[in-house]
Image (spheres, coloured by chain):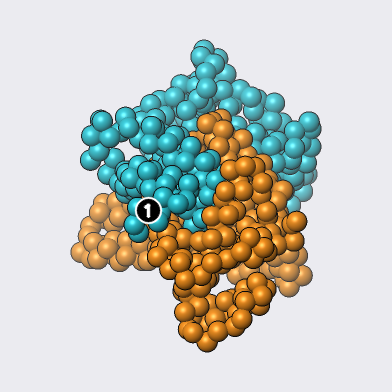
C-alpha cells in the first residue's frame, strides 16, 4: 500500500485521511454498547457527536464519490449504530417513573374516559341481564359461572354456607400471601389478554367485559335470593372497586385499539393504531399496578377485615382515590417521558 | 425527528428490505428490516433462555422448600408465582427497555427494536409490543394444546389466532401485531469491520495489464461491485470463470497463466478509477446496459 499507488484515487485519499476517525468512533460506540459508557472520559463523550457527524458526512461523500461497496456498507453500519447510541439516550429511570405517575398515566386515562365509561356500561349490562336471568331461573347459574370459580357456591347452597364463605377467610388460613399473589397474577394476565384482544376490532374485548359482568350478576342473584345481598356487596367492594375499575380500563384500552384498527379515520391504519397503542399502553402499565393493589386488598384485606361497614368504606375510599387521581388531580400538560 | 418511509428501489432482492431512514442531519441511513427467519431465531433463543431460567429458578425454590415451615413455604410460593409472572411478561420488556433495545436473543442475531419515527424507544412502546404477545403467542398455543374443545372449535380457533401469529408474513415491513400497535420496527444492526480496499492492494500489478478506453467502457457500477465481491471472496474457481468472461467480453485472448487474480484486480482498479472520475463529473454508469 504505497503512498504513490493509493494517491492515484481520489476516493482512496479520502479514505486514508478519515479512517482514523471512523475507527475511533467505532471503538467508543463499542464501549458504550457493551455498557461501559462510564469508562469513557468527559472529553471522549463530548467528542462523540463530532465524530458521529464526521462519519455521517463521510458516508454522504462516499456514496457520491466511491464505488467501494464494502466501504459504504461499513459506514452505513457504523453511522446507524452511532445514531442509536446518540439519539437513543434514555433519561434516568427515576425521572421516567416519576413523570409517568405525575402526567403520563392520568393523561392517558383522561383521554380514555369515553371508552372507560363504555366498558363500565358493558359490564353493568352483563351484570343486570344475568341478574334478571338467574333470579327468574336459578338453573342458569351453572351455565354462566365456571365450576372452579364458583367454588361450590351456588343456588343449591344454604344461606349459612354462603354466609360462611363471606366471612371465614376462605378457609385459606396462613396462606393469604400466596392467595393474594395468585389472584394478582391471574387477574393481570386476564387484563393483558383483554387489552391484546382489542386488536381483533375490539369484539373479544367486549365479550370479555360483558362476561365479567355476567359472573358478577349471577353471584348477586344467588346471594340476594338468600337475603345476603348487602354482605356480598361489601365482600366484593373491598377489592372489587379497584379490580373492576382496572379491568374496565384494560377493556377501554383494548377498545381504543380496536376502534383505531377498524376505523383509522384520516390517518393511515398503521399510524392510527400506533397512536392508539401509545395511550392504551400508558393505561395498561397502570392497570397491572392497580391489580396488584386489588390482589392485596382481596387476598389479605378481605380475609382480615370481616366487618361489612369497614369493607365498604375501604372499597369506596379506594375508588374515590382512584377517581380523584385519574380525573381531578391537576396535571401539567407536558410531553411525558415513556 | 428522523423521517422514515419505504424505499422504492427494489432492483435487487437485498433492497426490498431497505427502508429510508433520514436522520436529523439529513442523511439517509438506509436501514435493513430484519427478515422473519432471523426474528424467529432470536425468539427461539429467548424462549430457551426463559425456560432454562424458570427451571433453574424452580429447582432452587424446591431445594429451599425442604424442611421449610408454613411461613417459609408461603413466602417461597409467592416468590415463585411472582417470578413466573415477571419472566413471562417482563423478560422481553425489561431487556428492550435498556439502551441496547434488544433481548439477548436479538443481540446474538444482531437485531434491534427501534421506534419507527426515529426518536428514542419509549417505555410504553416496549410495553405495548410485548403485551401483544398474549395474542400472538399465548392464544394460538392455548388452542393448539387444548383438549377439551371439540375438533371444529379448535380448528376455527387455531385459524383465527393464526392470523395474529403469522401477521409478520402478511406485511412488507415484517411487523408483528405488537410492532404495529407500538409503532416500532425490528432492524438489523450488524457490526462490520472495515476491509482493505480491493483496489489499492492491486496497485503494484497494474503495470502488467493495460486497458484501452473502449475496454473500460464495457462495464458499469453494478458489475464493478459484483467484481469487488468476487475479489473479496477470493474463491479460485469463481475467479477463473469471471476472468474468462471478462476477457471474452473485452476481446482479450484467454490465457492459462494462472494469475486471474492479478488480472481481475488490475481490471477492477482501472475500471473503478474511470468510473469514480466520471462520478466526480456527474456522469454515472449504473450497469453495462446503460450507454
Q: Where residue A312 sits: x, y (%)?
A: 50, 27
Task: Name chain B's colour.
Answer: orange
Which residue of the protein is positioned furthest toward the bottom in this rendering?
Answer: B256
Quarter of the image where one finds residue B52: bottom left
Relative to residue B104, is residue B126 depicted above or below? above
Quadrant that contains the C terminus of chain B: bottom right
Q: What residue do we see at 62% from left, 57% from top? A: B221
In this view, the residue in front, A73 or B283, is B283
Relative to residue A123, is residue A148 depicted above or below? below
Which residue of the protein is positioned furthest toward the left in this rendering?
Answer: B67
Circle 1 sits in a helix, a strand or a loop, which is it? Answer: helix
Q: Can residue A171 be seen by looking at this rendering?
A: no
Quadrant that contains the N terminus of chain B: top right
Q: Where residue A81 sits: x, y (%)?
A: 44, 45
In this view, the residue in front, A107 or A206, is A107
In this view, the residue in front, A263 or B110, is B110
Q: What residue do we see at 52% from left, 31% from top? A: B25
Answer left or right for B204 relative to A44: right
Q: What residue do we see at 37% from left, 43% from top? A: A17
Q: Where residue A131 sits: x, y (%)?
A: 72, 40
Residue under numbered circle 1: A4
Q: Which subunit holds the residue at mark 1?
A: A
Task: Name chain A's colour.
Answer: cyan
Relative to residue B235, is residue A237 depicted above or below? above
Amino acid at each position: 500500500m504505497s503512498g504513490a499507488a493509493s494517491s492515484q484515487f481520489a476516493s482512496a485519499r479520502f479514505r486514508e485521511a478519515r479512517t482514523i476517525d471512523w475507527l475511533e468512533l467505532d471503538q467508543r460506540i463499542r464501549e458504550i454498547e457493551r455498557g461501559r459508557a462510564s469508562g469513557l472520559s468527559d472529553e471522549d463523550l463530548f467528542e462523540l457527536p463530532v465524530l458521529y457527524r464526521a462519519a455521517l458526512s463521510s458516508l454522504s461523500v462516499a456514496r457520491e464519490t466511491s464505488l467501494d461497496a464494502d466501504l459504504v456498507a461499513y459506514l452505513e453500519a457504523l453511522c446507524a449504530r452511532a445514531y442509536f447510541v446518540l439519539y437513543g439516550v434514555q433519561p434516568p429511570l427515576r425521572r421516567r417513573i416519576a413523570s409517568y405517575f405525575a402526567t403520563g398515566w392520568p393523561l392517558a386515562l383522561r383521554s380514555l374516559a369515553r371508552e372507560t365509561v363504555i366498558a363500565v356500561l358493558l359490564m353493568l349490562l352483563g351484570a343486570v341481564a344475568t341478574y334478571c336471568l338467574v333470579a327468574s331461573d336459578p338453573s342458569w347459574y351453572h351455565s354462566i359461572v365456571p365450576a372452579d370459580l364458583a367454588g361450590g357456591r351456588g343456588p343449591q347452597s344454604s344461606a349459612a354456607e354462603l354466609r360462611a364463605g363471606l366471612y371465614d377467610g376462605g378457609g385459606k388460613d396462613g396462606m393469604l400471601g400466596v392467595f393474594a399473589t395468585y389472584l394478582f397474577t391471574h387477574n393481570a394476565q386476564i387484563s393483558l389478554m383483554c387489552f391484546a384482544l382489542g386488536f381483533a376490532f375490539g369484539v373479544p374485548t367486549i365479550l370479555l367485559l360483558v362476561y365479567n359482568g355476567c359472573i358478577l350478576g349471577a353471584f348477586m342473584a344467588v346471594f340476594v335470593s338468600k337475603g345476603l345481598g348487602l354482605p356480598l356487596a361489601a365482600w366484593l367492594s373491598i377489592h372489587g372497586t379497584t379490580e373492576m375499575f382496572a379491568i374496565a380500563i384494560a377493556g377501554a384500552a383494548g377498545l381504543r385499539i380496536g376502534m383505531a384498527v377498524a376505523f383509522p379515520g384520516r390517518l393511515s391504519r398503521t399510524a392510527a393504531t400506533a397512536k392508539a397503542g401509545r395511550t392504551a399502553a400508558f393505561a395498561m402499565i397502570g392497570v397491572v399496578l392497580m391489580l396488584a393493589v386489588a390482589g392485596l386488598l382481596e387476598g389479605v384485606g378481605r380475609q382480615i377485615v370481616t366487618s361489612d361497614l369497614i369493607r365498604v368504606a375501604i372499597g369506596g375510599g379506594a375508588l374515590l382515590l382512584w377517581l380523584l387521581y385519574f380525573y381531578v388531580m391537576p396535571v401539567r400538560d407536558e410531553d411525558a417521558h415513556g | 425527528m428522523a423521517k422514515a418511509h419505504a424505499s422504492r428501489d427494489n432492483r435487487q432482492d437485498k433492497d426490498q428490505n431497505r427502508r429510508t431512514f433520514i436522520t436529523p442531519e439529513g442523511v439517509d441511513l438506509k436501514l435493513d428490516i430484519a427478515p422473519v427467519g432471523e426474528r424467529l431465531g432470536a425468539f427461539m433463543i429467548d424462549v430457551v433462555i426463559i425456560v432454562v431460567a424458570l427451571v433453574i429458578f424452580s429447582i432452587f425454590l424446591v431445594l429451599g422448600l425442604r424442611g421449610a415451615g408454613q411461613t417459609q413455604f408461603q413466602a417461597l410460593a409467592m416468590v415463585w408465582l411472582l417470578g413466573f409472572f415477571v419472566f413471562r411478561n417482563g423478560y422481553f420488556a425489561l431487556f428492550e427497555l435498556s439502551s441496547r433495545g434488544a433481548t439477548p436473543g436479538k443481540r446474538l442475531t444482531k437485531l434491534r427494536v427501534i421506534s419507527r419515527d426515529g426518536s428514542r424507544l419509549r417505555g410504553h412502546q416496549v410495553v405495548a409490543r410485548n403485551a401483544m404477545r398474549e395474542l400472538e403467542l399465548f392464544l394460538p398455543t392455548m388452542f393448539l394444546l387444548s383438549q377439551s374443545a371439540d375438533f371444529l372449535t379448535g380448528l376455527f380457533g387455531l385459524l383465527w389466532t393464526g392470523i395474529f401469529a403469522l401477521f409478520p408474513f402478511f406485511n412488507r415491513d415484517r411487523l408483528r401485531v405488537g410492532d404495529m400497535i407500538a409503532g416500532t420496527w425490528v432492524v438489523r444492526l450488524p457490526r462490520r469491520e472495515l476491509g482493505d480496499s480491493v483496489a489499492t492492494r492491486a496497485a503494484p500489478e497494474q503495470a502488467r495489464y493495460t486497458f484501452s478506453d473502449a475496454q473500460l467502457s464495457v462495464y458499469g457500477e453494478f458489475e464493478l461491485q459484483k467484481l469487488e465481491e468476487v475479489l473479496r471472496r477470493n474463491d479460485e474457481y469463481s475467479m477463473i470463470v469471471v476472468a474468462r468472461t471478462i476477457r471474452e467480453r473485452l476481446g482479450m485472448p484467454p490465457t492459462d497463466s494462472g494469475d486471474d487474480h492479478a488480472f481481475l484486480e488490475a481490471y477492477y482498479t482501472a475500471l473503478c478509477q474511470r468510473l469514480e472520475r466520471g462520478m466526480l463529473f456527474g456522469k454515472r454508469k449504473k450497469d453495462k446496459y446503460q450507454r
